[in-house]
Image: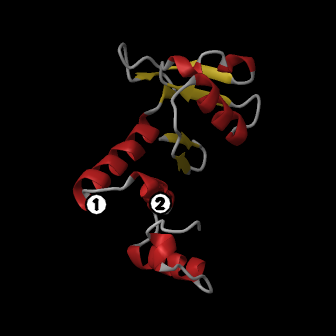
Amino acid sequence: MFGLLERETGKVRASVVDFRRKWHLQNAIHDNVAKGAEIHTDALHSYDSLDRDYAHKVIDHAEAYVNGNVHTNRLENFWSLLKRSLGGTYISVEPFHLFRYLDEQAFRYNERKATDAERFLMVLKAIAGRRLTWNVLTAKEAG
């Protein structure tokens, strides 16, 4: 899984990635982050050389979790909430549905200031006029 959190808005984007290799992760960053932006990452080597296009600051969790304004704590909070929901609420998650769980958790996180009723109405408005068949839901045919 891969995630980005925009500090000003507090909005998160998460997606399933097949590999944690440099090429895959850096492409995902370039697709979602404007060049020249300041980004904070952990010390994963896949993030090396991001300083060519970004103001890249690294926090090495083996040494510290915060260094002034440099941290990944808010995104770590998102991952913690996701892991608790996958392990506690949903228990068994099929890999081909993982992106759906990520989308749901990102929605909950991004709309965390709304009430449950407000989030429910947002979802109802988003699904109006759409149809989801059993075969698509169970991945028996392409969606």
- Quickly name the residue at label 2: 100
- Note whether residue 10 is visible: no
| Viewer-nearest residue: 25 or 92 | 92
Looking at the rendered structure, the secondary structure element under dot 1 is helix
Q: Quadrant of residue 104?
A: bottom left
Residue designated by label 1: 90
Q: Quadrant where the C terminus lies?
A: bottom right
Residue 111 place in picture, x, y as percent? 49, 63
The answer to whether 99 appears left or right of 81 in the picture is right
Q: 48 left or right of 88?
A: right
Q: Image height check: is 104 above or below 98?
A: below
Q: Say which label, 2 or 1, has the lower sequence index.
A: 1
Residue type for callout 1: Tyr
Percent x, y for residue 27? 68, 33
Residue type for callout 2: Arg
Q: Nearer the viewer, residue 2 or 141?
A: 141
Q: Please give the name of the residue rendered at 55% of the width and 21% of the height, measured from the top-left corner.
A: 46
Where residue 28 appears, x then y in whole percent? 64, 37
17 versus 103 height, above or below:
above
Q: Residue 100's spot in the image, x, y percent?
A: 47, 60
Vertical placement of residue 133 versus 45, above or below: below
Q: Residue furthest bottom?
A: 129
Pick whichever, 69 or 38, lies toward us.
38
Mark 2 to mark 1: distance in Å?
A: 12 Å
**Contact between labelled residues 1 and 2, with CB atoms less than 8 Å apart:** no
Q: How is the image coloured?
A: secondary structure
